[in-house]
Amino acid sequence: MPKKKVQTETTTKPKARTPEEPEKEVKPKAAASKKAAPKKAESVQKKKAPKKAATPKKAAPAPQEEKVPELTVEEFPQLPEQILPQPRRSIAFIGSECYPFVKTGGLGDVMYALPRSLIRQNCDVKVILPRYKCIPWEYQEKMVYRGEFTMNLCSDGRSFYVGIMEYVWDGVVYDFIDNEEFFSSGNPYVNLIDDIPKFCFFSKAALAALNYMDWVPDIIHCHDWQAALVPVYLRTLFEGTPVASAKVMLTIHNLRFQGIYNIPTIRYWSGLPDYVFNKDALKQGYEDANMMKGGITYANMVTTVSYTYAGEIQSPFYGENLDAHLRYHSGKLRGIVNGIDYGTWNSYTDSMLAAPYDITNVLQKKKENKRALQEQLGLVQDDHVFVIGLISRLTDQKGLDLVNEILPSLIDGHTQVVILGTGDWRYENSFRYFEIVYKGSVCSNIMYDEGRAHRIYAGADALLVPSLFEPCGLTQLTAMHYGTIPIVRETGGLRDTVQPYNQFSNDGNGFTFDRYDPGLLLDAINRAKTLYFTNRWCWDEMVQRDMDKDVSWDNSARQYRDLYLELKP
Ligand code: ADP
Ligand code: GLC
């Protein structure tokens, strides 16, 4: 629910300009693509007091002029001005997904939680997203028309309609880039043939929208390959326009996905000048262009989501063929570990749980949640078994080959395994198979279900994250926050966030193993089981220690703010 009004002016608000100023980007095109701009071939002139929304059937009635009301610090009574860190900074987040509008993985969580946390660090945040058709109607209907224009995109001058729909929620301004041709598929990611043009369009439209709205942030913070052309556009086609005064940061959430396609296709759809297709920027190998690589070249700062992953990606094994490029740019590469949103993940107020709990009653209530989970999933109802959860995209990144190898050895009458995920058919099918073979002990939920995820975090004793690589990982953080012990491989953010249990000093947060080896995973699980069954006192202490651990965004948001200040002192 939108509660607060927000200031959309930056601390460095540019002087008023004529609408023609960003003309390279939003110049009216006589021959606007008919399909892309179905309603009208728009002029770049701002529409005063628009009468209808970009998609008239669904959008809320347009407000008068696109002046967004101001948020003053006083409207956050919990944040008196004197305790807010100074100075104020304005940030535009640009990314392809954001909970609760659209989420396929952790990127969606970060795009939701980090802006909210930055607001408490005295940042003014606007989040720019595609207006996918799959965004639930409850949010679509609250969006307000903010304007529209036509934008040149392709190298032959083909231009497209860009609508801006706005939704203000808890102090964060969400601006959705509207274009039915690009964003009408059910899923944000379809295949590269469709996705490359879509995200060229999105990256350029996001910058053009900032110029259009006269909102020039101190920092543009873009995320993953889908927004990696933003730094490239900013320092080429947008040079000389107001938005070019911003510094730009690129965060790599997952280096596996880079947006690689042949040069002619990316050159055509991006409309970028030929000189960016050189080996130091976009060009990869002999004939491909790599959007992530170009973003790394042109960004002022590159971050990734854990300290360890920032080091790993500079090595051939984790570098996904960009290790040398990242080593070259290592001076501007940093790692900041993710957090989780304590509003979304609060076991005490979590309405999806059978028995909400906090650190004082977790030991008792976890049993009730375990029992409810077993009942819901058709598992044998028994308080004394060890329940292992796995909540994951089902891809080879997540170490599922190891799980497949050892799963039969886990089932001993005292252990149950609950899987929740979707992805590669081979993992979906192997987990379905295990459910049939070990009925009552294994439950494979091949689906995406937020509520079920909450109930597994609360009802399981341990959560498995044996990833081959893991930039950060959020599930181990959520598990700890819900008093569920993580069992993880020591890689990326898993290594930075889970301290291995030490039986001699009785400290640590979970069980870990290093080499990617099924035997070592099995050993880690057996160590966990041994503690659980033979030394429950120490196990329970670890449960409480984990719930007490700070895995919120506060600390990391502070580090992002420090980087923003480093870029714009
Ligand atoms: P990744 O981004 O690589 O998928 P993360 O651990 O960073 O991994 O984030 C995954 C997020 O998606 C977590 O919030 C997790 O709870 C959620 N999630 C993953 N699979 C499912 C699912 N099948 N149903 C519900 N939530 C899921
Ligand atoms: C990616 C990574 C995951 C990370 C998430 C959010 O999807 O796979 O490790 O937590 O992004 O940064």
Image (spheres, grey):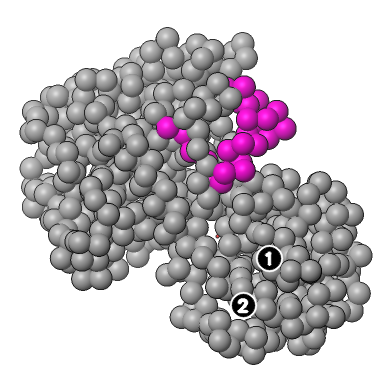
Q: Quadrant of the N terminus?
A: bottom left
Please say whether residue 20 is visible from this viewpoint.
Answer: yes
Q: Give yes or no for residue 332 being in the magenta stretch.
A: no
Q: Give yes or no for residue 321 being in the magenta stretch.
A: yes
The residue furthest front is 505
Q: Work out how far the residue at label 2 is from the one at label 1, CA to CA, in angstroms.
A: 11 Å
Secondary structure of the residue carrying tag 1 is loop
* Amino acid type of the residue that numbered disc 2 sits on in the rendered structure: Gln
- Residue at 50% from the left image edge and 58% from the top image edge: 339
- Residue at 37% from the left image edge and 44% from the top image edge: 562
Q: Nearer the viewer, residue 520 or 344?
A: 520
Residue at label 2? 544
Mark 2 Cα shell of 10 Å, populated few (<14), some (14-19), many (≥20): many
- Residue at 35% from the left image edge and 24% from the top image edge: 233
Residue 15 at x, y = what percent? 9, 33
Closer to the chain start, of discs 2 and 1, is 1
Task: Tell me which segment is drawn in magenta.
Answer: 301-325
Q: Nearer the viewer, residue 68 or 269?
A: 68
Residue 318 shown left or right of residue 138 in the figure: right
Residue 235 at x, y = what percent? 33, 21
Residue 541 at x, y = what percent? 67, 78
Mark 1 Cα shell of 10 Å, populated few (<14), some (14-19), many (≥20): some
Q: Nearer the viewer, residue 11 or 284?
A: 11
- Residue at 76% from the left image edge and 87% from the top image edge: 383
Residue 97 shown left or right of residue 439 in the figure: left
Find residue 508 and name its label: 1
Find residue 406 and name its label: none
Residue 178 at x, y = what percent? 32, 43
Among the 4 quarters of the image, the one containing residue 309: top right
* Amino acid type of the residue that numbered disc 1 sits on in the rendered structure: Gly
Residue 132 shown left or right of residue 81 in the figure: right
